[in-house]
Image (cartoon, rainbow, N blue to C red):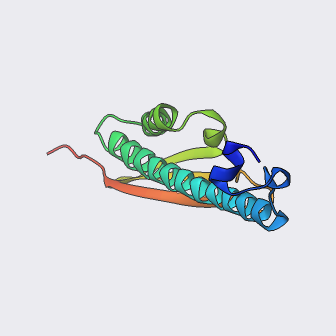
Amino acid sequence: MNRAQRSTGTSCGEGGFLTIQFVLAVALSLLMLVLVANVIIVQYGRGVVRAAAEEGAQAGSRLSASEADCEARAGEVLDGLLGGPMGDRISITCSIGSSEVIATVRYTFTPWLPLVPAWAGTQTSVAVKETIP
């Protein structure tokens, strides 16, 4: 027996031995890590969608603003904060009435794993339309 074997107390045949339970536990923990990271990313995306709806409604509330201005501002926020494939399935609509502006953003976030359902929702923000004093 050499000196390294005496100091660790292992014999030659036990080096690198893993059980199937350990491999499965590591795989399951990595899977859970991916799921938690995906939920965090979706929460971030929902925050960006909320900010885009609010910014669009505020931009559309100006006296001379149109629905295109509202949609353009919401689109700028989305492009600046949520680029890439996560921002592909998002639609923006604005409606300007006589006293209020309604910005609606519909989103669907595709999950990273095939067994997880997609996250879909709608965020609506309302702002009071400016009037001539």
Residue projecting furthest to the front:
1
Residue occupying image coordinates x 80% and y 58%:
18
Residue 105: x and y in percent read 53, 51
Q: For the C terminus, which image quadrant?
A: top left
Q: Nearer the viewer, residue 20 or 119?
A: 20
Q: Vertical placement of 59 versus 15: above or below? A: above
Residue 5, horizontal then vertical, whole percent: 71, 49
From the viewer's perspective, tell me whether residue 53 is left or right of residue 119.
left
Q: Position of residue 82 (x, y in %)?
A: 53, 38
- Residue that lies at the very extreme toward the left in this rendered image: 133
Q: Nearer the viewer, residue 28 or 7?
A: 7
User: Residue 64: x, y in percent?
Assistant: 32, 34
**Residue at the spot x=68%, y=56% of the render?**
30
Q: Quadrant of residue 32?
A: bottom right
- Residue 130 appears in view: yes
- Residue 116 visible somewhere in the drawing: no
In the picture, measured across the screen, residue 96 lies left or right of residue 43, that is left
